Image (cartoon, rainbow, N blue to C red):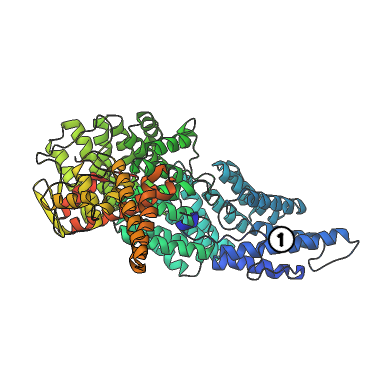
Amino acid sequence: MTITSWGPERCAPLDDDQGEAGEDAADVAGLLRAGERALLDDGDLGASRANFAAAYRAADLALGRDDASEGGSDALGRGTAGAEALGRAALGLGGLWAHERRGAAESALVRVRQRDALRRLDPRSPMALRLRIRLAGEEDYRSGGHAAILDLVGEARRASDPVALAEALHLAHLCALGPDDGPLRHRLAQELTDQAAGTGRRFDLLLGLLWQTVDLFLAGHPHAYRRLAELRAAIGGGHLAFGYAVSAMEVMLAVRTGRLDRAEALSKESARLGAAAGDVNTVGWRAGQLGVVRWYQGRSAELVGGLSELIDSAALSLIDNAPVAGLALAAATAGDTRLATGTLARLCGRDLGDLPRSSSWLMALYCVVETAHLLGDRETAARVYELLSPYAHLPVVASRGAICLGTVQHSLGVAALTLDDADGAVRHLREAVRGNLALGHWPATVLSRWRLGQALARRDGPDAEPAARELALAESEAAQLGMKLPPMERTATAPRRERRSGPARCERHGRLWRVVSGGREAVVEDGVGLRYLAILLANPNADIPAVELAASAAITPATSGEGLQARESARHGESVQPVLDERAKREYKRRLADLQDAIDAAEDAGDASRAAAATAERDWLVSELAASAGLAGRTRRFADADERARVSVGKAIRRALDRISAADAVLGAELGTAIHTGRRCCYRPT
């Protein structure tokens, strides 16, 4: 999976010539107007970057000629006018947000150009103040602080320069998106909105409304929806960058209402809008939104390959650690303990408390504590509990309202559950259910209720009525929303609900399968996913590699004696047994030998069509099955055979579970919770 698969991205290099970006020094004023129009009026960040880059080169060239001439002049004029134009171009290179140049080389080049332009300006000029504001904001953003930019907010107020003050307020707000800064953000956003009347720029009004909307979502305020409607109306489709920001919030709201398929479709469209705007956040936001959808769908394991590639991408912000935490959680969900543990260690470093309190910090810790819970990592859970406790009243909202994972109380409850603090877990998770209901976040509510049922079972016993009620309600609501709940627990002390009727079983009758569990049953049509399920249900609590499941399903319907015997046994109600790796190898070799004999015989008889058919089957078997199972001792890379099997087997099993859910929603939800897919698949009856 390539990084661009998370969503398209359009970020023009500094020296690209696009749109109106010509190199004629005489047209510096036109290039500056084009850049400012693209940035302020259209929200086309890619076009604005290209025009400002061209304007800078042209202005710098003209000033260089001017410096070299004696008493001469050029299109810019000597001294102040030329330096002012260079300053406008250098300022525009910063773009709308902070850290728009994600690559180290490009980022450094922009800083050099801005400092050079500042050196050429009168330090008392408004343009010099604006450049110092931009440089301070960028530096604070990279370090995760906001002290320097707040000092310049005060200086801009004293200078009575409305444009400089608006820009300082905006950058200060960007640098104060951490969970500690709510009251500060509120003051900055309100002042920016008020300041828009002084600048006369519609752009500043939209920025003020955007930040007020974001602040309300970050605080979990019920009036956030009203302000979003006001912002949407004010934009009116007239600004690409702000339109993209609104579309990202709409993805988040679709997740909250439990419309996960709709949220995924909206995320794809939002990424398209982000690419059209040239917004550098497109890749990270798309990855985060898809990660949240897959988490609630119980499909996080699918993201391991993409996140493994993404986490080292220059497309991500320097202070965004959520993708690394997301990879740890995806790996833990997939059962890849080694990758999950290693990724968690990479993220935690010397101490989790050293991570910058950025706009994605709460999301990162959400993923960390869920990973710690799945791994039984008590030390990490304790540290997360300590770090998150001051923010129990907040929702886990990332970036500019693009992602929401419910209330922080949920993470505190999961941490307490991992630490065997049943009373604390019950307390926090009850608050999480209430808080998530207040947010209107239905998937988060269901997940908190599921964890609450576990905590009650831990405290009161697995047969206690309150625990059974919460677990049953969570399962029912999950089925309605198309969610797959995470495993009960993987720690040695995990409570297990007794099921007197025993594990589920899967019986084949011709083209139909009868799936039975706990007095419920569903009859569904045959499919490869049902064959995988039959193997898993016949081997409860056994981890079976996806490549072995793929091999077993391919061999079972074949004409080999073992395959026919397995099929006949299934018809008579016997469980289909798994085809293990060594047995699969023998089958592969035997079938390949038979095919080679058939090819030789056909060629000797001059039967070209029969020889071609046998050759095609032989080639397919070698490429798709033998390689996956390690035939002849060959080992395939994770990203090749194992990854291909993980994806195809996981999809087939989910299709089978969908069929079962269509026949019996409760049975489908129960199996969906107990079946775990990934590189290794397992049925863990609760």
* Whole-percent x, y for residue 423 in the image: 24, 31
**How many numbered discs?**
1
Q: Nearer the viewer, residue 341 or 564?
A: 564
Residue 492 visible to an observer of this rendering: yes
Q: Is residue 398 left or right of residue 598?
A: right
In the rendered view of the protein, which quadrant contains the C terminus? top left
Q: Amino acid at mark 1?
A: Tyr
Above or below for 453 versus 588: above
* Whole-percent x, y for residue 454 in the image: 22, 37
In the rendered view of the protein, which quadrant contains the N terminus? bottom left
Q: Is residue 540 left or right of residue 189?
A: left
- Label 1 element class: helix
User: In which quadrant of the rendered view does residue 249 lie?
Assistant: bottom left
Q: State the residue position of label 1.
A: 56
Residue 507 visible to an observer of this rendering: no
Pick out the residue farthest to the right: 70
Q: Nearer the viewer, residue 395 or 384?
A: 384
Q: Nearer the viewer, residue 77 or 568?
A: 568
User: In which quadrant of the rendered view does residue 36 lie?
Assistant: bottom right
